[in-house]
Image (cartoon, rainbow, N blue to C red):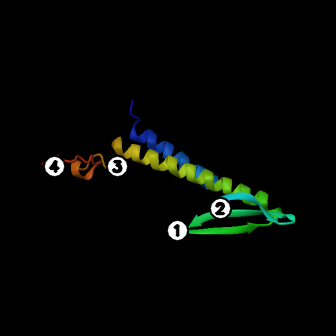
Amino acid sequence: MQRKSKDLDKEIDGLKKQLLEIGPMRPGSLSKQCRHTKKGAYGEYWQLSYTFNKRGHTEYIPGPAVKAVQAEVKNYQAFRNVIGKIIDLSIKAFSAGGPFSGLPVWLGPVDIVRSPQG
């Protein structure tokens, strides 16, 4: 059963409110690295790796800041999850006859049909 556009819009509004509750965020993944030498382990350190504006970045994270950065990375993952849900529901709302339902067919949702080449 297809959900009504109004129900989907209410769910989207709820997700938008969740976005306001997400705290500071930072993209990427945090990992513990260890540098080795011929004499043995040289030391451990934390590294944040991420891509921003199509460029890779790596940052050293000092030990005392690790928990804060972990929380920021977790917040960013939650942000991406909520945004993904909003996009999915927006697409469903459009297909269910959202704000464009009164427009001519050629301005509404489009199904691309390819004609056989012959």
Q: Nearer the viewer, mark 4 or mark 1?
A: 4
Q: Is residue 59 above or below residue 109?
A: below
- Earlier sequence position, callout 2 versus callout 1: 2
Q: Which sits in the foreground, 118 or 63?
A: 118
Image quarter of residue 36: bottom right
Three-letter amino acid code at the position of disc 2: Arg
State which mark lies toward you, 3 or 4. Answer: 4
Report the residue at 36% width, 46% height from top. 94
Quadrant of image for the N terminus: top left
Mark 1, residue position = 54
Q: Secondary structure at mark 4?
A: loop
At mark 2, the secondary structure is loop
Q: Going from the N terminus, do you reach mark 2 or mark 4 first? A: 2
Looking at the image, residue 114 sits to the left or right of residue 63; the answer is left
Residue 117 - label: 4
Going from N to C along the chain, the mark reached first, 3 or 4, is 3
* Element type at mark 3: loop
Q: Position of residue 14 (x, y in %)?
A: 54, 46
Give the distance between the C-alpha atoms of the residues marked 3 and 4, in whole angstroms. Answer: 36 Å
Counting residues from the N terminus, which is met first, the one under dot 2 or under dot 3? 2
The mark total stands at 4
Residue at (66%, 54%) from the top-left corner? Answer: 75
Q: In whole angstroms, how far apart are the C-alphas of marks 3 and 1?
A: 34 Å
Query: Residue 34: which quarter of the image?
Result: bottom right
Type of amino acid at the residue the image marks with label 3: Pro
Q: Report the residue marked by disc 3.
A: 99
Determine whether label 4 and label 1 are within 8 Å by CB.
Answer: no
Quadrant of residue 8 within the rendered picture: top left
User: Which comes before the other along the chain, label 3 or label 1?
Assistant: 1
